[in-house]
Amino acid sequence: MFLIDQDSLPLSGRSREFEGNDFGNAGVSFILVDAPPGGEPSLHRHPYAEVFVVQQGRATFILDDEEQEVTAGQVLVVPAGRPHRFVNSGEEPLRQIDIHANSHFITEWLDS
């Protein structure tokens, strides 16, 4: 059994990262996102599905050439291999949980 204080998870920018390999080889990893308005990661993809649980704010997700507005209380699933990115398109901080269906992060960054 592992009990983890979120503040002890590694920081990546303003977000916290949980990598399952570090905690009993849990079969999942996740990012606790805290993005300011306009904040965004660049275009990327994963060889596994990613699930986004928006808890506060609003984000615009771009998958290939599709755009989808997602707000607090909604969940978005990105299938494996789909290029995607998102931007905090609201006026308040974006808080979401990005669940990676893998015990460690595998990210291919596509923007040069």
Image: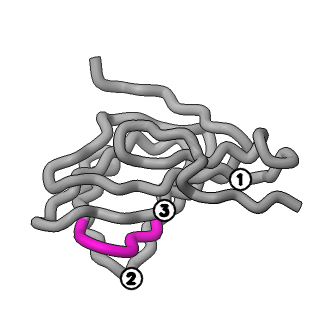
Q: How far from the left and from the top, in percent, is residue 86?
A: 29, 51
Asked if labels 1 and 2 touch by Cβ distance under 8 angstroms, the answer is: no
Which of the two discs, 2 and 1, labels the residue nearer the N terminus?
A: 1
Give, as a single range, the part of the protein colored magenta: 52-58
Quarter placement of the C terminus: top left
**Residue at 23% over, 51% down:** 87
Asked if labels 1 and 3 touch by Cβ distance under 8 angstroms, the answer is: no
Residue 9 seen by the camera: yes
Look at the picture and state if 5 lies above or below 85.
below
Badge number at residue 97: 3
Give the residue number, with chain letter if any, for mark 2: 73
Q: How far from the left and from the top, in percent, is residue 89?
A: 15, 60
Give the residue number, with chain letter if any, for mark 1: 28
**Could you tell me which secondary element the residue under label 2 belongs to?**
loop
- Depth check: give the residue in front, 72 or 111: 72
**Residue at 57% over, 57% down:** 6
